[in-house]
Image (cartoon, grey):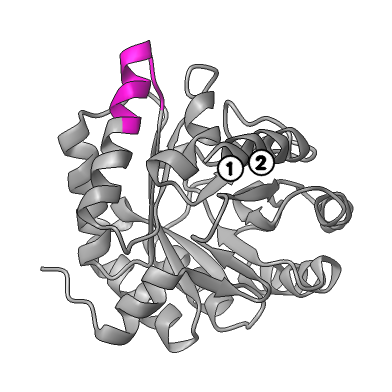
Amino acid sequence: MIVITKRDWWQMSQGYKLGDLTLGEGMPKVCAPLTGTTVKELLDECELVRNSEADLAEWRVDFFEHALDTKKVLEALAKLRQELRCMPLIFSFRTAEEGGEKNITVRQYIELNKQVAQSGAVQLIDIELFRGEDTVKELVATAKEQQVLTIISNHDFTQTPETSEIMSRVEKMLDLGGDIPKVAVMPVKEEDVLTVLQANLQLKKSYPSRKMIMIAMGSLGIVTRMSGEIFGSVLTFAAVKHASAPGQVTANEMKKVLKIVHNAQ
């Protein structure tokens, strides 16, 4: 059962404030991934992202050479926070099971994300739905204590589930207390793209106050990255140096398209 307080409903309906940025207001926001393996590479990427059309950044820490060393992750994170200045930052350890670069134990995953949430250096953390209910609940609770937003995510790099299954996963994410559900799937035929858009639209109508991210990856799914304002996806991912998933165009190209769609509304 999804329980939402009056205060939570007001915040969700108004969008999530991230400094000067409001996620869920106006055009979908553009998020650029940081995928460097070393601190130097990451800092170079931060400068590129900061000077691009991206609205916020995502540190895909699983690319980092010391991703399993929490102390080194926190040291690097402090440097990234300084280089990004006021730009909001998402912290994401994408596990190997969901297309990421490294394996990690459940306990390591929990401790890493908890310490990052407590660091004061990020505005959002990404928590994978299939790490388990207890893991998700523990991390959501820690994030809420620290006033850090949570993206509860699911990534499928092999297929596109049916509309009902996508909706079921999103509803589970909401049940577990996530602020922003995210589903990214791989279409293998044109109809799969329509499935994603249909699920997104139904969720938008069923939960009008909730902010969601819905993506079909690869070349087939590129339209889903650009049509969020119509179908209800509030964030899209676009590359500045290296893409973190198939189908990402550059942040500058993405912003141009989003403006065209926005001005037509």
Residue lying at 49% horizontally and 84% vertically, measured from the top left: 147
Q: Quadrant of the N terminus?
A: bottom left
Residue nearer the viewer, 39 or 265: 265
Dot 1, how many residues are within 10 Å of its Cα: few (below 14), some (14-19), or many (20+)? some
Where residue 95 is drawn, which disc sits there? none
Q: Position of residue 53 (x, y in %)?
A: 78, 48
Of helix, strand and loop, which mostly describes the magenta segment?
helix
* Marks 2 and 1, how far apart at CA: 5 Å
The residue range painted magenta reads 186-197
Horizontal side of 48 relative to 64 (left or right) equals right
To which quarter of the image does residue 196 belong?
top left
Residue nearer the viewer, 259 or 95: 259
The residue most toward the front is 264
Q: Amino acid at mark 1?
A: His
Residue nearer the viewer, 247 or 28: 28
Let me know if residue 66 is in the magenta part. no
Residue lying at 57% horizontally and 50% vertically, measured from the top left: 27
Horizontal side of 265 relative to 174 (left or right) equals right
Q: Position of residue 59 (x, y in %)?
A: 66, 56
Dot 2, how many residues are within 10 Å of its Cα: few (below 14), some (14-19), or many (20+)? few
Residue lying at 88% horizontally and 56% vertically, measured from the top left: 47
In the rendered image, is residue 159 in sight?
no
Label 2 SS: helix
State the residue position of label 2.
259
Q: Amino acid at mark 2?
A: Lys
Q: Position of residue 260 (x, y in %)?
A: 65, 35
In the rendered image, is residue 50 in sight?
yes
Q: Is residue 217 above or below residue 6?
A: above
State the residue position of label 1.
262
Horizontal side of 164 relative to 50 (left or right) equals left
Disc 2 to disc 1: CB gap under 8 Å: yes
